Image: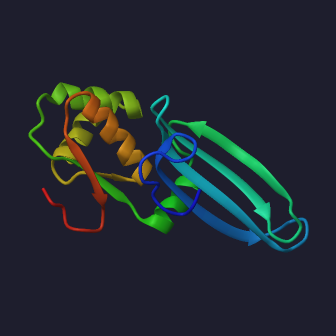
Amino acid sequence: MGAGLVGGMGAGGAMAERTAKVESPCGTCGGVLVRQVNQFVFVQDGQLCWDAEGGCVSCGTGWCEQFGSGETPEDIRGPLLAEHGPSRLCVTDPVPSLVSVLKVLREVWEVSLPRARELAGELTDTGLVGTLAEMEFLKIRLRSRGVAAEVRPAGGPAPW
């Protein structure tokens, strides 16, 4: 799908997709093995999904390595952050109810109530940082509970 942000919905009903490629030597022929990792919000069922596939540009060996939803494995998440940098999610208006924020954080990350309170504090202060797809997914979930939020590159100044 390309190495950038998909504007709107992509070919598979995905939005906020990021792709990264990792090269290594092919174990079969010694050529260049390219592993492509992806993370995206799948619009149809509102899931945060990820996958990985690979192939050798020399001998043509290829495979679909893994696919899943929910928490993204670090061997997929790491290359995405390295290539694209982190994104920051922050609320843009006063939070109508902290309970709404806590519910979303506990549902999405399955954290304890004290940890959800810590994360809610970060969210309403400096913002939460993660991959673009993770932050867009959380933004969608927050907005469904009436909490306005925006996603920006983490490196730039916060507009709020």
Nearer to me, 135 or 129: 135
x and y, in percent, of residue 12 in the image: 57, 42
Farthest residue in the left direction? 94
43 in relation to 53, above or below: above
Camera-nearest residue between 159 and 104: 159
**Residue 101, image quadrant:** top left
Residue displayed at 49% across by 31% down: 44
Residue 65 shown left or right of residue 109 in the figure: right
Q: Residue at x 47, y 61 (%)?
A: 81
Question: Is residue 35 visible in this depiction of the protein?
Answer: yes
Residue 15 location in percent, x, y?
A: 45, 46
Query: How many labels were placed on the picture?
Result: 0
Give the camera-side residue of 26 and 146.
Answer: 146
Could you say which quadrant of the image residue 98 lies in? top left
Residue 137: percent from left, percent from top: 39, 40
In the image, residue 60 sits, relative to residue 116, either above or below, namely below
Which residue ends up furthest to the bottom in the rendered image?
31
For the N terminus, the quadrant is bottom right
The C terminus lies in quadrant:
bottom left
Colouring style: rainbow
Q: Residue at (50%, 40%) from the top-left corner?
A: 71
* Residue 120 locus on image (x, y percent): 22, 39
At horizontal 49% and vertical 28% (from top left) the residue drawn is 45
Q: Is residue 113 visible?
A: no
Left or right side of 41 for 62: right
